[in-house]
Image (cartoon, rainbow, N blue to C red):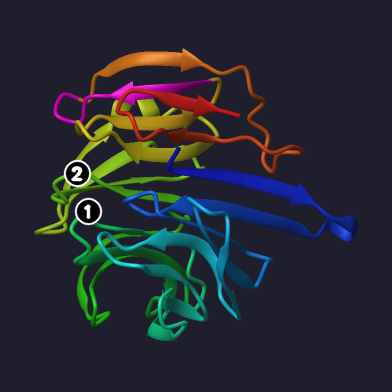
């Protein structure tokens, strides 16, 4: 399994959100979260802890073919597991979510800014690795983009929100909107977004996990999971791609 998402409720409304990620060669396992304020890394084969990095949080994302992890610290930061160094990549106040392209050359990030009228606008930006230089702004919206995912060839970026706008596909070269998967517009409670290795789009939310063909926008299959879709959730669960294409894990 590539990753999981968990929520645990504490007293007085405080909530921990924790994520788990595994490196491309399944050598390292990392966990991080919004309220954890630290990143922990383990060796998969031995179970030995490789590092406990403080002052970083958020979703841990392994860079392809490198023992480096993208995470959050007043913006984007890179953790080098081998050296133990943490490098601040780019300051992005209010950073919401991010994804790394399969070739490790681009980062898609969602972060807010103020327009000329003082209104908050949420942007999807494409940044270059390893410099953090902004290549282009893909989208602007008054609502938060909750999920981002790159296609296997890195040419398409998928975005989704919990606010019912559906899954939108973008060209990573030009930043132009390609299409909206129409069957997802009315799909409430989107909780996950992924591509399979064959380029199909997996959307978790509502009462099922759905698989779409991005070229046609057609829904190929719907897999009911029987989970309540209220947010936040009172118990942990996960809907993520396994390492075998077209195989899924529900826990």
Classify residue 22 as left or right of residue 149.
right
Q: Which residues are magenta?
A: 208-216
Which residue in the structure is indicated by mark 1? Answer: 102
Classify residue 235 as left or right of residue 39.
right
Between 64 and 14, the residue placed more toward the observer is 64
Q: Residue at x 32, y 51 (%)?
A: 24
Q: How many marks?
A: 2
Between 63 and 47, the residue placed more toward the observer is 47
In this rendering, is residue 236 above or below 126?
A: above
Q: Residue at x 47, y 55 (%)?
A: 143
Q: Residue at x 27, y 79 (%)?
A: 132
State if disc 2 and disc 1 touch (CB < 8 Å). yes
User: Of label 1 and label 2, which has the lower sequence position?
Assistant: 1
Q: Is residue 97 visible?
A: no
- Classify 10 Å Cα crowding around label 1: few (below 14), some (14-19), many (20 and above): some
In this rendering, is residue 167 above or below 12?
A: above
User: Residue 91, image x and y in percent?
Assistant: 42, 84
User: Residue 64, image x and y in percent?
Assistant: 27, 59
- Classify 10 Å Cα crowding around label 2: few (below 14), some (14-19), many (20 and above): some
User: In what quadrant of the picture does the C terminus appear?
Assistant: top right
Between 122 and 157, the residue placed more toward the observer is 157
**Which quadrant holds residue 233?**
top right
**Which quadrant holds residue 76?**
bottom left
């Amino acid at each position: 399994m590539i990753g999981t998402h968990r929520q645990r409720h504490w007293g007085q409304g405080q909530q921990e959100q924790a994520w788990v990620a595994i490196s491309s060669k399944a050598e390292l396992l990392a966990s991080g979260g919004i309220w954890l304020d630290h990143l922990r890394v383990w060796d998969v084969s031995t179970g030995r802890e490789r590092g406990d990095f403080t002052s970083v949080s958020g979703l841990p994302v392994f860079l392809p073919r490198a023992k480096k992890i993208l995470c959050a610290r007043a913006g984007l930061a890179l953790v080098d597991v081998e050296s133990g160094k943490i490098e601040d990549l780019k300051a992005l106040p209010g950073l919401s979510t991010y994804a790394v392209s399969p070739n490790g050359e681009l980062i898609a990030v969602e972060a807010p800014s103020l327009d000329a009228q003082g209104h908050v606008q949420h942007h999807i930006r494409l940044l270059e690795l390893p410099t953090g230089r902004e290549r282009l702004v893909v989208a602007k919206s008054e609502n938060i983009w909750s999920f981002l995912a790159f296609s296997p060839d890195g040419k398409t970026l998928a975005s989704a929100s919990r606010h019912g706008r559906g899954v939108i596909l973008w060209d990573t070269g030009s930043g132009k909107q390609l299409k909206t998967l129409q069957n997802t517009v009315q799909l409430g409670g989107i909780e996950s977004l992924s591509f399979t290795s064959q380029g199909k789009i997996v959307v978790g939310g509502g009462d099922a996990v759905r698989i779409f063909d991005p070229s046609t926008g057609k829904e190929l299959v719907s897999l009911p999971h029987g989970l309540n879709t209220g947010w936040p959730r009172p118990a942990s669960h996960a809907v993520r791609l396994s390492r075998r294409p077209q195989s899924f894990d529900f826990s």
